[in-house]
Amino acid sequence: MTAIAPPRPEAAIAVAHLRKRYGAVEALKGIEFAVQPGEIFGLIGPDGAGKTTTFQILAGVMAATAGEVRVLGKEPRLARLNLGYVTQKFSLYPDLSILENLRYSAGLRRVPAARFEAQARSLLQRVDLDRFRDRLAGQLSGGMKQKLALCCALISGPKILLLDEPTTGVDPVSRREFWDLLAAVAADGVTVIVATPYLDEAERCHRIALIYAGDIQQIGTLQDLRDSLGLRRIEVRAEPLGQAEAVLHQSGGAIVDIQTFGDRLDVMVTDAEQGQAQIRAVLAHNDLHLSDLRLDQPTLENVFVNRLRQQGLDPADLAFPTGRSGQDKGGIAIATRQLQKTFGDFQAVRGVDMTVHYGEIYGLLGANGAGKTTTIKMLCGLLPASGGEIELAGETSRLDRSEVRSRIGYMSQKFTLYDDLTIRQNLEFYGGVYGVPKPLQREKIDWVLETCGLVGQENRLTGSLPGGWKQRVSFGASVMHEPDILFLDEPTSGVDPLARRQFWRLIRDFAQRGTAILVTTHYLEEAENCNTMAFMVAGAIVAQGSPSQIKASQPGQLIELVSRQTQAASNLLKQRLAPWRVSIFGDRLHLVLDDPDRDLIAVQRWLQEADIPVQSTRPIPFSLEDAFIGIVQRAEDVQRVKAP
């Protein structure tokens, strides 16, 4: 007798032929997808791709132009009471405390008082906000605000959770806590749709839809998308790296793409064996030293970039119209010794020592509130230091002088452009401020417009641009005068994968001409582009080195563990190990074990005693995110021990 398969549960969300027009602009072009109950579904794409429009239609706050949408089997507006929605803009009341914001959200959803107390305590503990429950929302860091917004969306126990770029600008530690909570919520049966431009965190979704310019390009699990690419990725470390990239680009054969990441190359090949042999042969033929060759799976970024390139969407790669020769590489551009900054009784920066050379890309990384932006503002002369020494472009005093500032480019977290000016007017303004000669100014403005893909739109008001496009124009404005030193504070937030690659290609080009570049970012995959990086914790630098050095210096081993009961395994192990050592990545766990031979036996025993089966375990290399979180958490543990 033939077994009958159990019926597939009705989709929690079903979207068919969905279209949305704003006048002549078609924001959604007939997209289709379905999300199952308890699934974490990622809607992945850059600013302007159509994610927010999709979310607003799903939430019932906007009508579709055409198509059909069902949420829990109903029209979206009839399902609102079962929805939790975290928008891109903070929906919190800054003059209310954490607990008051939660209570207000619960009141809107008619949550009983008795249930509210237990639910609020549990949620705040899970995101480490319980000890700050009386702090005003307006005094929270960006990461804390986002975690509170998530708690407000969850306080009523919704069946569906819509999260529109909830972790943009959130540091890696807070982001991991955020995603661990999402995994727990989904395990309880809540359906989660999350939009994010961060492709590394999108890998934690059960399924992923890649969306670009209103079209869904591809849908599947991470492995489905990797397999569809038909390519393998090889990490190559060779010296000199620039020459290695050039000769491999020219070699053709199995090599289809090369991307530079700080001290390594990522080489995409059609065949792993042929690709490795070709790389070895080409480098040996050109007398270049190969120090390491490592085969790995493609990343989600590789998949997305390849898909967009097939459609001819790669941005223009144009030479910058330079008007002067740059600095000689190797000299000291920025140096600090015991740099300090206090605000009243609070010490925001404590004893920072760093050196950045001309021609170097230096990454300053840290959690929200670690002191990164304060450090940059002191280096730029925008804030006076409370102590220590600064050397900037050979100067040690009066760093706010126009002669010093004319040698600096600064792209801040908040856009440096004027929203009520057109794109061209903004660029003309900055060209004039920096004294760029008129003929060269026109040439450079044309370069910015063409590089950004905005030719023909130069008279558009800057305030009407999506965030990622503003970032691109802002970068162009900050380099028009060819600065010797360039400060970039979170430069690629909201930028699509191809544009992000273009950003870093331009950054490397400026470094090749001798520009010293200091960059902050929460996007740790792109931080691998830096030659040197420093991790800041509570105002102090706790680690420095190249990306490879930092990853190699991590104590212990990163273990990937696969179980059919991922959430149950995570819950148990977080009770036995420090919680930061355990994290869910899609359908598997990552464990940081100091003594893997001993600790892994204990882990397997604990899971066996709890009747949680383990399918497999294997050691995997530390990612930069794993290294960052380990360094930050260990440093905070030391500080807690030292505290009186």
Image (cartoon, grey):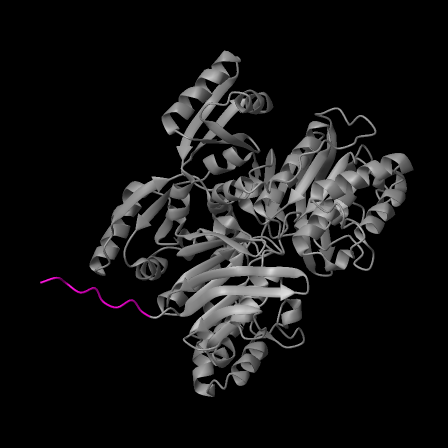
Where is residue 148? Give x, y as percent.
Answer: 55, 69
Question: In the figure, residue 34 lies in which quadrant?
Answer: bottom left
Q: Residue at x 68, y 40 (%)?
A: 518
Q: Relative to residue 346, is residue 166 drawn left or right?
A: left
Where is residue 4? Give x, y as percent.
Answer: 17, 65
Magenta span covers which residues?
A: 1-9
Q: Residue at x 55, y 57 (%)?
A: 643
Determine whether 137 is above or below 415 in the image. below
Q: Residue at x 64, y 73 (%)?
A: 136
Question: Residue furthest toward the left?
Answer: 1
Q: Relative to residue 533, is residue 173 drawn left or right?
A: left
Q: Relative to residue 537, is residue 382 drawn left or right?
A: right
Determine whether 124 is above or below 362 in the image. below
Q: Is residue 236 visible?
A: yes
* Residue 6 among those drawn in magenta: yes
* Residue 181 among those drawn in magenta: no
Where is residue 126? Give x, y as percent.
Answer: 45, 66
Q: Relative to residue 570, is residue 352 drawn left or right?
A: right
Q: How would you classify the magenta stretch by its main secondary structure?
A: loop
Question: In the figure, residue 27 lies in which quadrant?
Answer: bottom right
Viewer-nearest residue: 350 or 7:
7
Viewer-nearest residue: 358 or 391:
358
The quarter in which the N terminus is drawn is bottom left
Where is residue 517? Give x, y as percent.
Answer: 70, 37
Determine whether 323 is above or below 39 in the image. above
Viewer-nearest residue: 228 or 513:
228
Question: In the figure, residue 188 lies in which quadrant?
Answer: bottom left
Q: How many marks?
A: 0
The quarter in which the C terminus is drawn is bottom right
Q: Is residue 401 visible?
A: no
